[in-house]
Image (cartoon, helix red, strand yellow):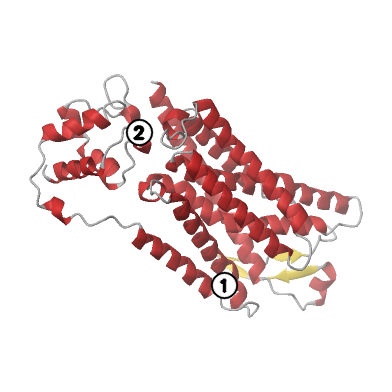
Amino acid sequence: MELYLLDWGNLLLRWLHVITAIAWVGSSFYFVFLDNNLIRPTSPDLLEKGVDGAMWAVHGGGFYNPQKYMVAPKKIHTHLHWFYWESYTTWLSGFALFAISYLWQAQTYLIDPNLVPWQPWQAGALALAFLVVFWLLYDLICRTLGQGPRGDLVVGTAVALVVALASWLATEWFAGRAAFLIVGATLGTTMSANVFFVIIPGQRQVVRAMQNGQPVDPIHGKRGKQRSVHNTYFTLPVLFAMLSNHYSMVYAHAHNTTVLLVMMAAGALIRQYFVLRHAHKQGKRANPAPYAVVGVLLIAVLVVWLRPAPQAAAQAQAPVADAQAMAVLQARCVQCHNAQVQMKGVRLDTLDNMRTHALAIHQQAVVLRAMPMNNSTGITPAERDLLARWFAAR
């Protein structure tokens, strides 16, 4: 019953997490698009009000005229909407999902005894430390290295190095599937922390100064802009890290650190293309297509590099009988899929159950190579091939 309830909790939290992430990422992408499409007005009344950029858009049968004020407007006449609950709800639902899946079941999901034989509490504490320590280092970098004309480049380089270090440590200490997710959760935590600790507090100080008739310090807008830009570049790497746990070809590879870093770099480059393309259309930037080309090429190189070795000889072998396939399941799968323990509600301890779940066995153990989890039972390539031939002979 506990596993059944955990599965429901996992499903519902994942659903909520995806919904709120769509809202957060969507609003983030929209405002980046907006910033790169705003045109400085020439109308005296807009300039007198302090409007620095504006644009016209049409959607859903109506026309919109968003305007951006540098530092702050003189007065806010209507309700002020704050964009933060999308971020907070995404992080809270994601952390809850991480807790019931990876922390609650650390022995299954976090630990690969072939790497480090952690105790479950040690692995859980270290996973949480990743979230906190990375944010502290990142925040320190942003606050101390961002000065001067090349401050953004220095900060970006330093953050990239810290991301690389975190990725290497995660893949050295945790099971590959968990390592990728921890890196994604670390970056996602940093994104939400940027909103909670920097962007929203700075905006609140700006609003408070406006209401009190005090001068507005532009540093809050600069800091908020910096963290917002960082968030948009983190987005695609985070999404890849979160989705990767369905594809063992990336996280179970012998050089999974390289795979993770290359995919995250590709995501950031592709995001750079979309950030700059609107400014290019306005004549403000050079054509950003090379960023997208390099990003796509990096992915193409990985696709070729990770391709499985040809197995043409296996097709000529004799079909596999049920008894042979059952012997593999008894050795590698039944520990977690039997009458007493039914992970994901699946039993594989009888021939009838094996036949009932034949498609799932083929998908999870042969195609995705996601099972056994972290290959904890040591299934071999030859045994996976045997299951493939058994499925083909059905």
Tell me the residue at 58%/55% (across/down): 234
Residue 42 vertical position relative to residue 211 in the rendered view, above or below: below
Secondary element at image label 2: loop
Amino acid under label 1?
A: Arg
Residue 376 is marked as: 2
Say if 107 sits above or below 236 in the image.
above
Rendering coords of residue 238 (x, y %)? 53, 51
> Which disc is residue 277 wearing?
1
State the image quarter where residue 274 is shown: bottom right
Amino acid at circle 2: Ser
At label 1, counting other C-alpha atoms closer than 10 Å, the crowd grade (few under 14, some 14-19, many 20 or more) is many
Say left or right for 346 vs 183.
Answer: left
Percent x, y of residue 134:
63, 45
Viewer-proximal residue among 316 and 204: 316
- Asked if residue 176 lies left or right of residue 339, the reply is right
> How busy is the neighbourhood of tag 2: few (under 14 within 10 Å), some, or many (20 plus)?
some
Q: Is residue 386 left or right of residue 182?
A: left
Looking at the image, do the residues carrying marks 2 and 1 touch, with CB atoms under 8 Å apart?
no
User: Is 299 or 101 nearer to us in this picture?
Assistant: 299
Q: CA distance from mark 2 to mark 1?
A: 46 Å
